[in-house]
Image: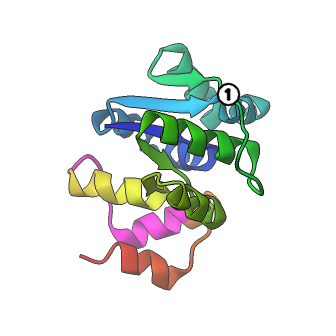
Amino acid sequence: MRIVFNTSPLIFLEKLKYLDKIFDVFSEVIIPKAVYDEIRAKNDESSKKIAELISMGKIKVLQVTAEGIVGLHKGETEAIILAKRNNCWVALDDLKARKVARSEGVKVIGTLGILKLLKELNLAKFEPEDLFKELTQVGFRIKKELFFEIFKD
């Protein structure tokens, strides 16, 4: 199963120390050039780790022309276009971008969906209460009720 990532799911998964687990689920991890540029613009630990995975060839960077979709950031637009062209999943957290991707016929998953998948596959072990606390500490925003609705058994 292949997936194209936008910036925020990569960053949040790395900050939570689950990014390495995605390679046990997805056979190919792709990011568009605009996402690569966003990651390179920062010089923090998460960006360094993602850059390392790119240099190792675990994450592929592909060039794409961002056209045909308006109203989104360049990285989101390119991610949706790449996922549509490659008939694969796209990882997006932004609600507007997720709606656009679905309207384009692209399968969408976000940071929480990936975390839930990792837990279901026994690739990640966490209690929802602890994960919610960690997510808020790294700047992930979600209503508490929605989070627990997603992670109920």
Where residue 148 sits: x, y (%)? 40, 79
Residue 114 drawn above or below residue 133: above
Q: How crowded is the residue under tag 1: few (<14 C-alpha within 10 Å), some, or many (20+)? A: some
Residue 130 is one of the magenta-drawn residues: yes
**Quarter of the rendering occupied by the N terminus:** top left
Foreground residue among 50 and 138: 50
Where residue 117 sits: x, y (%)? 30, 55
**Quarter of the rendering occupied by the C terminus:** bottom left
Magenta residues (range): 122-135
Residue at the image position 54 percent from the left and 49 percent from the top: 9
Residue at the image position 50 percent from the left and 35 percent from the top: 85
- Residue 16 visible in the displayed image: no
Given the current orientation, which residue lies at the most extreme front position? 68
Where residue 13 sits: x, y (%)? 49, 47
Residue kind at label 1, given as amino acid type? Lys
Query: In terms of image quadrants, where is residue 63?
Result: top right
Residue 85 drawn above or below residue 107: above
Given the current orientation, which residue lies at the most extreme top position? 56
Query: In terms of image quadrants, where is residue 79?
Result: top right
Query: Left of 126 or right of it: where is 103?
Result: right
Query: In terms of image quadrants, where is residue 74?
Result: top right
Query: Left of 135 or right of it: where is 127?
Result: left
SS assignment at label 1: helix
Foreground residue among 92 and 129: 92
Residue 62 drawn above or below residue 115: above
Residue at the image position 29 percent from the left and 39 percent from the top: 25
Residue at the image position 58 percent from the left and 45 percent from the top: 80
- Residue 41 visible in the displayed image: yes
Residue 91 is one of the magenta-drawn residues: no
Residue at which label 1 appears: 33
